[in-house]
Image: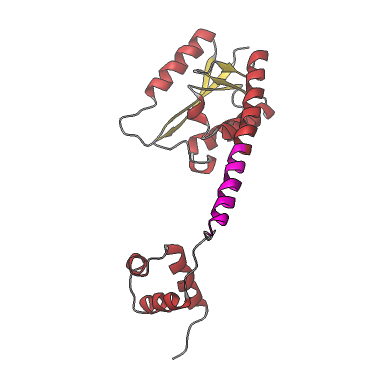
């Protein structure tokens, strides 16, 4: 039976980029293999750093995989699919659990073959190493900051500054102007605004 392939195409927010080259490369590969194109999913003008909830094409592809609409997903290269190695492995593992194979053209990785499955397993090991490395660097950075006496977390807003912000809010000053005047984050201003609304003062 002819394999049904879904292609996933993505370009980031850079201008003058299109998915057309990716489409042509994958179409040639599908034709050479004698497979059929079952579906095409596109995220155009969307950064790979975005999660699935911000990538409608990727989200639609995963939902279609659950419904068994195709047997394989083909992508031009690793970076088009996952925002990190860990993210790629997560997507690949989810697809495999649904009986859908993954093909990365540039990396020549085909999870339907024994060698491809071995390669994918190695990616899983590297992804775990990547996570451990990030965790280790984060802990080292926190320890270094603590040793240098730096305050960790969100900077606190002094009571005096809170009163000033409250007065500006009462006067109807725009949030962005208050941010520039008080030199605090917008979230802190909204917190004070919310507190004022929940506990209104009586005149």
The quadrant the N terminus occupies is top right
Where's residue 5, x and y in %?
55, 20
Q: Is residue 176 left or right of residue 118?
A: left
Is residue 142 rendered magenta in the image?
A: yes
Residue drawn at (54%, 37%), measured in percent from left and top?
59
Residue range highlighted in magenta: 133-149
Q: Which color scheme does this rendered protein use?
A: secondary structure
Residue 113 seen anywhere in this rendered image of the structure: no
Q: Is residue 70 visible?
A: yes
Q: Residue 124 lies in magenta, yes or no?
A: no
Residue drawn where x is 57% and y is 42% of the image: 137
* Quadrant of the frame with the C terminus: bottom left
- The answer to which image quadrant residue 146 occupies is bottom right
Q: Residue furthest left?
A: 16
203 over 157 or under it: above or below = below
Residue 107 or residue 36, whichever sits in front: 107
**What x and y, as percent, mark residue 134?**
58, 40
Q: In the picture shown, does residue 183 fall above or below 39?
A: below
Q: Main secondary structure of the magenta part?
A: helix
Q: Hey, which quadrant is residue 28 in on the image?
A: top left
User: Residue 50's spot in the image, x, y percent?
Assistant: 48, 41
């Amino acid at each position: 039976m002819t394999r049904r392939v879904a292609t996933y195409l993505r370009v980031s927010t850079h201008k003058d980029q299109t998915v057309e080259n990716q489409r042509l490369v994958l179409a040639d590969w599908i034709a050479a293999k004698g497979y059929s194109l079952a579906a095409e999913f596109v995220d155009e003008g969307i950064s790979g750093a975005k999660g699935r909830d911000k990538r409608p094409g990727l989200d639609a592809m995963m939902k279609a995989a659950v419904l068994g609409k195709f047997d394989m997903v083909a992508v031009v290269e690793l970076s088009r699919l996952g925002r990190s190695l860990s993210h790629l492995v997560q997507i690949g593992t989810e697809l495999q659990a649904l009986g859908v194979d993954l093909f990365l053209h540039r990396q020549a990785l085909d999870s339907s073959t024994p060698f491809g499955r071995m390669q994918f397993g190695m990616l899983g090991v590297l992804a775990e190493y990547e996570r451990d490395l990030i965790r280790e660097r984060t802990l080292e950075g926190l320890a270094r900051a603590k040793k240098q006496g730096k305050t960790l977390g969100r900077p606190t807003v002094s009571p005096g500054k809170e009163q000033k912000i409250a007065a500006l809010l009462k006067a109807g000053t725009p949030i962005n102007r208050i941010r520039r005047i008080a030199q605090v984050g917008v979230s802190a201003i909204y917190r004070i605004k919310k507190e004022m609304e929940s506990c209104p003062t009586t005149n």
